[in-house]
Image (cartoon, grey):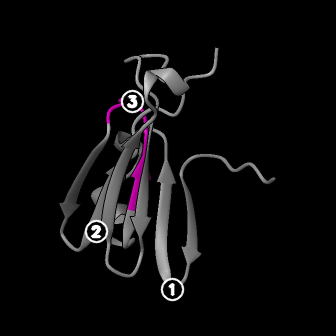
Amino acid sequence: IELFESPHSVDVAGVRILLVHDIGEVSDRSIAEHGVVIHGFTHQHQMKSAGDSLVLNPGEACGWVYGTPSAAILDLESRRVEFITLPPEEWPR
C-alpha cells in the first residue's frame, strides 16, 4: 500500500485521474487537465461534468456522517458510474 498527499494525479488505462479530498483545493485548470477527478469532503455521492472532465464523489465509505456507507464503480472506457450503498443489515457492528 502506498499513501499519497492530496491532490494526487495518476494514469490508469490511459486515463489521467486526479484524486483530491476537497475539490476546492484544485484549480479549474487542474480539473480540465484530467479525464476524471475523484474527490470526497462532502461525504455525499455526486457526479457531474466540468468541460470534458468527469467529476465524481463516491460518497462516504464508512457512513459515519450521513449513516449510509456508499461507494462508486466507474467504467473508465464508457465513463459509466454506478453508485452503491451497503444495506443496514450488512453494516459492520
Given the current orientation, which residue lies at the most extreme bottom position?
Answer: 14
From the top left corner, tell me how far across and down residue 55 is, in percent: 31, 57
From the top left corner, tell me how far across and down residue 84 is, in percent: 39, 44
Specify the amino acid type for callout 3: His
Q: Residue at x 41, y 17 (%)?
A: 67
Taking the image as shown, residue 55 lies to the left or right of residue 93, namely left
Mark drawn on residue 53: 2
Mark drawn on residue 74: none
Q: Return the disc, 3 or 1, that comes first in the chain's sequence.
A: 1
Q: Return the disc, 1 or 2, that comes first in the chain's sequence.
A: 1
Q: Residue at x 20, y 62 (%)?
A: 50
The residues colored magenta run 37-44
Work out how far the residue at label 1 is from the one at label 2, CA to CA, in angstroms: 14 Å
Q: Could you say which is closer to the camera, residue 84 or residue 39?
A: 84
SS assignment at label 2: strand
Mark drawn on residue 43: 3
Q: Is residue 39 above or below residue 31?
A: above
Q: Could you say which is closer to the camera, residue 30 or residue 15?
A: 15
